[in-house]
Image (cartoon, grey):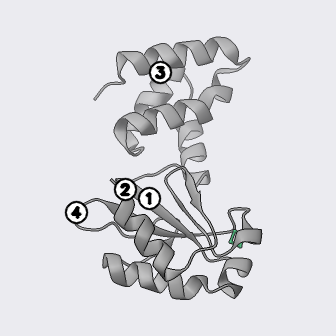
Amino acid sequence: MQLKPETKTKIKALLERYPRRQATLLPVLHLVQEDFGYLSDEVEELVAKELDIPRAAVSEVVTFYTMFYREPIGKYHIMACHNLSCTLMGAEKLIQHLEHRLGVQSKAHLGETTEDGRFTLTRVECLGACGEAPMMQINDKYHLNLTIEKIDKILEELP
Ligand code: FES
């Protein structure tokens, strides 16, 4: 297992921009996760070697942030907010609908993935869009003021 040459080039550019090697970790982990889909032990080792920092420093960051994955996830990561405002606006019913429709169980931190590898359904804490609750994020995109009908339409329109 190796880092892609393009990724190595981008990491080199990042290392020139930051005062300390360790400070590049967040952008580097995003780049590497894009390449591999998730950050396995082996990938963490590659990152530590590339940045010449201890493996523990990499693991600390990977395990702290929920946007880094330690196992494979679906093509579409549905992050359904189940915090106060969303719950008050009916999030639980929507999450149950998603679970039923996709045939997976949602969980905090990282939920289950559909058998075809298309969707992972995770319950997340507040994503800062309480004014337009209930909401969910799919990969990088927010979907607001959700209803069951809206969710069905969103899922059907995904390529
Ligand atoms: S509680 Fe759901 S976005 Fe804030």
Horizontal and vertical percent position of residue 88? 70, 87
Specify few, some or many for label 3: CA neighbours under 10 Å numbering under 14, 14-19, or 20 or more.
some
Q: Quarter for ligand 1? A: bottom right
Question: What residue does disc 4 label?
Answer: 116
Q: Find the residue positioned furthest to the left.
A: 116
Q: Which residue is mark 2?
A: 73
| Amino acid at the residue labelled 1 | His
Compare residues 30 and 79 and report the one nearer the observer: 79
Q: What residue sits 68% from the left and 74% below the top?
A: 133
Find numbered disc 1 in the image and state the secondary structure of the residue it sits on: strand
Could you give the CA–CA distance between mark 3 and mark 4, rounded to whole angstroms?
33 Å
Please tell me which residue lies in front, 129 or 13: 129
Q: Are marks 1 and 2 in contact (CB under 8 Å)?
A: yes
Instruction: State the residue position of label 3.
Output: 50
Callout 4, which amino acid?
A: Asp
- How far apart marks 1 and 2 lie (CA) works out to 7 Å
On screen, residue 37 versus residue 24, left or right, reads: left
Of label 3 and label 2, which has the lower sequence position? 3
